[in-house]
Amino acid sequence: KNQVEQSPQSLIILEGKNCTLQCNYTVSPFSNLRWYKQDTGRGPVSLTIMTFSENTKSNGRYTATLDADTKQSSLHITASQLSDSASYICVVSAVYTGANNLFFGTGTRLTVIP
Amino acid sequence: DTEVTQTPKHLVMGMTNKKSLKCEQHMGHRAMYWYKQKAKKPPELMFVYSYEKLSINESVPSRFSPECPNSSLLNLHLHALQPEDSALYLCASSQNWGDNYGYTFGSGTRLTVV
């Protein structure tokens, strides 16, 4: 069964600190993995997208890693800011068409406090 | 233009009303999607349009009626909704159905049914 699990469910950190969010998946056959940031009541915004052959990808203070062997990904946020408070969603896509091929994690709710 | 535009941003409607949600993109994407997202849950796929034809209907009640007038526009017609239909409705588009590299979400319509 295709599943995406994220941990932790929620996280509170002090402004300026680093944090790491985890994503484990069982989606097969794997196409790519994308991390989204979603502010409350708004649409998801893509942070990074990684294919099977990519281990690390950065976007400013966001760095995503992918281990396709263990089917794990992480999103590392450096020097957190108050504006980083949001839900972070891991989305994995499978290599097929003709049916829904995007699988969403339930997200990690990050709160950055001053 | 690399955006998916959704209108209105907020909508409050009674259970006997008829309303429509609109979604527009000018990226030349040929696949467009409607999602429903309840609070603290991941988005759930409702409909997929590919080349202006309905390709997936994820067993959505008939009180939700999608329409794709042309390759840039996607509407969701609402009629006789229930309070439990209150949610964030997200539109997304991609180059082709199953192509996730250009997958872009709109900012959503916050729907409240009273």
Image (cartoon, coloured by chain):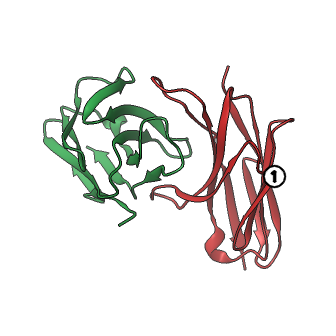
Chain colours: A red, B green
Q: Specify whether B99 is left or right of B112.
A: right
Q: Position of residue A92 (x, y in %)?
A: 64, 39
Q: Position of residue A10 (x, y in %)?
A: 72, 52
Figure disc tally: 1
Residue at 45% across / 53% down in the picture? B104
Q: Residues within 10 Å of mark 1 (few under 14, many from 20)?
A: few
Residue at 13% across / 40% down in the picture? B17
| In-front residue for pair A5/B82 | A5
Q: Specify whether B34 is left or right of B70.
A: right
At mark 1, the secondary structure is loop
Residue at 68% across / 29% down in the picture? A27
State the quadrant of the N terminus of chain A: top right
| In-front residue for pair B36/B85 | B36
Tell me which amino acid carries mark 1: Asn
State the quadrant of the C terminus of chain A: bottom right
- Residue topped by disc 1: A55
Q: Position of residue B52 (x, y in %)?
A: 25, 36
User: In the picture, residue A79 is in which quadrant?
Assistant: bottom right
Q: Position of residue B5 (x, y in %)?
A: 31, 59
Q: Specify whether A107 is left or right of B100.
A: right
Q: Specify whether A53 is left or right of B93.
A: right
Q: Outermost residue toward the right?
A: A70
User: In the picture, residue A33 is in which quadrant?
Assistant: top right
- The answer to whether A102 is drawn above or below residue B25 in the figure is above
Residue at 74% across / 28% down in the picture? A26
Q: Chain of mark 1?
A: A
- The answer to whether B86 is drawn above or below residue B106 in the figure is above
| In-front residue for pair B1/B48 | B1
